Amino acid sequence: MANTYTKIASVAVGAGGAVSMEFTSIPATYTDLKICFSAREATGGDYIRFSLDINATGTGLGTPKILWGNGTTANSGTETSPTVGYGVNRFSSTASVFSNTEIYIPNYTVSQYKSIAITGAEENNATAAFSSASAVLWSNNAAITSVKIYSPVNVAQYSTATLYGISKT
């Protein structure tokens, strides 16, 4: 059975950066959702760990299970908060290079808890660059109608996110 991707919306961060990228009024006409985003930290600091807010509830995300590596070591574990991803390029990463992350939400309209899979990779011309895969559960039976990706620091201008609806027809 073929999957059909349809672009629903895109967000581009403007001058000055932003702490979030948000999709609202997500239609219930698809089977799954996929968000692809490319981002870079706007100011100096440690690796960004981004979070999700679904349906503007601010609650319901469990503690993610995560696998990650940095070019020399690999680890696995459980996050201590609903942070759901590593791998966003730091301000000190190779200039003008952005990371890539994918968020996949199957069965986003069904009346049951929603599993979310996230993969991300920092792009960097160096030996140390984070890559991660994580999974988290949104403990809510509601259909997903909005998703906000946010971080504790600004992401840089030209960071983008695109939301796709996936139909299994």
Image (cartoon, grey):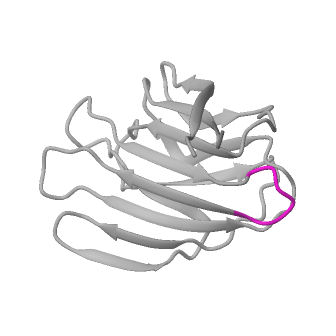
Instruction: State the residue at coordinates (58%, 25%).
Output: 10
Residue 111 x %, y %: 87, 60
Camera-side residue: 94 or 6? 6
Residue 111 colored in magenta in the image: yes
Q: Is residue 30 above or below residue 6?
A: below
Residues shaded magenta: 108-114
Residue 67 colored in magenta in the image: no
Q: Quadrant of residue 25?
A: top right
Instruction: State the residue at coordinates (54%, 50%).
Output: 103
Q: Main secondary structure of the magenta part?
A: loop
Q: Quadrant of residue 145?
A: top right
Camera-side residue: 8 or 147? 8
Camera-side residue: 124 or 47? 124
Residue 94 x %, y %: 19, 38
Camera-side residue: 123 or 32? 32
Q: Is residue 6 above or below residue 47?
A: above
Q: Is residue 85 above or below residue 19?
A: below
**With 65 as the anchor, is 67 left or right in this view?**
left
Q: Residue furthest front?
A: 1
**With 99 as the anchor, is 153 left or right in this view?**
right
**With 40 as the anchor, is 143 left or right in this view?**
right
Residue 100 x %, y %: 38, 42
Residue 86 x %, y %: 42, 58
Callout count: 0
